[in-house]
Amino acid sequence: MTLPSSGAEPDGARRVRVLSYNVRSLRDDRDALVRVVRACEPDLVCVQESPRYWRPFKQAAWLAGETGTVILAGGGRVAAGPLLLGRLGVTVLEVRDRLLPKTRGLHARGFAGALVRIGDAAPFSVTSCHLSLDPDERLRQFALLPQQLRAGEHGVIAGDFNEHPDGAGWRRLARAFQDGHATAPWGGTYTSVPDNPYQRIDAVFASPGIDVLACGVPHGLPGVEPADLRAATDHLPVLAVLRVPAG
């Protein structure tokens, strides 16, 4: 199956490419990472593990500049790691970063989020998340994700969920949102680890009003080299093509 391109449709709807990628604080091969992101030609990039401690805004700006995007949300103390990037044609209507309740002794975590609009399509919420390794805290964080959308809004939730699809939190989210790869499988399934993928812990979810056209790890996509996927970071990216209805 050829991956649909992004772009406008005659009725005002919009095909949107959303990339979700855990970049491990840019500690690996940055050039390989940039090549992967550029080859995916995303409209939106939901980043996890954006650098948090050493000049975080400067490093987020570097990643945006190298990938031909701009910072839309996150990348600071409130989001606590997640970052939202987008191409120049994305209009931010509202920033919805959120610092999550913290369990003592565990890492601070947050959501990078924004209400955006592209072309004549309806506004939709986009959230990048990186959930806890602790099962109880993670389950509470899963329950907060739908709150990133307001009543009647379309929305996308993408990230590193640190859980498999049979987990309680994942199943709860999948009852309200479409699990992109389960809905329209394309490319590869497993996202961790790049040298020997064996588990799916990264995903893109979409609200029921959005059509999922394709979603998966971009193996075989022109410009995405296996060597770059192995060198870029310790996760594989998830690329989704979504059809957002007309506004």
Image (tube, rainbow, N blue to C red):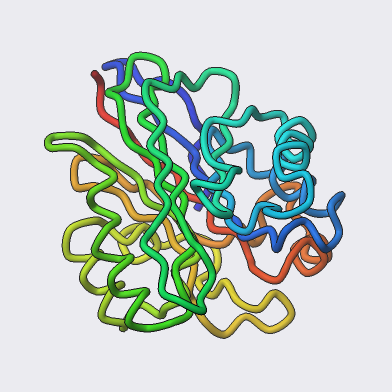
**Of residues 111 and 102, the one drawn nearer to the viewer in this rendering:** 102
Near-viewer residue (206 or 107):
107
Query: Which image quadrant is residue 227 in?
Result: bottom right
Which residue extends farthest front? 104
Looking at the image, residue 218 lies above or below residue 46 = below
Residue 25 x, y percent position in the rendering:
72, 58
Residue 143 placement, left or right of 79: left
Q: Position of residue 162 (x, y in %)?
A: 47, 75
Look at the picture and state if 40 lies above or below 228. Answer: above
For the residue pair 171 and 11, the one nearer the viewer reads as: 171
Where does the image place residue 34, in percent across and percent down from the top left? 78, 45
Count numbered badges in the picture: 0
Please, is residue 135 above or below residue 7 in the view? below
Quadrant hosting residue 92: top left
* Residue 80 image-quadrant placement: bottom right
Does residue 43 appear left or right of residue 194 in this picture?
left
Residue at position x 50%, y 65% from top?
A: 160
| Residue at (69% x, 45% y) in the render | 37
Q: Please indicate whether residue 220 sits to the left or right of residue 74 in the image.
A: right
Residue extending farthest left:
151
Location of the C terminus (image quadrant): top left
Q: Is residue 139 above or below residue 32?
A: below
Q: Residue at x 54, y 58 (%)?
A: 238
The image shows residue 51 at horizontal and vertical percentages of 71, 53
Q: Residue at x 34, y 55 (%)?
A: 205
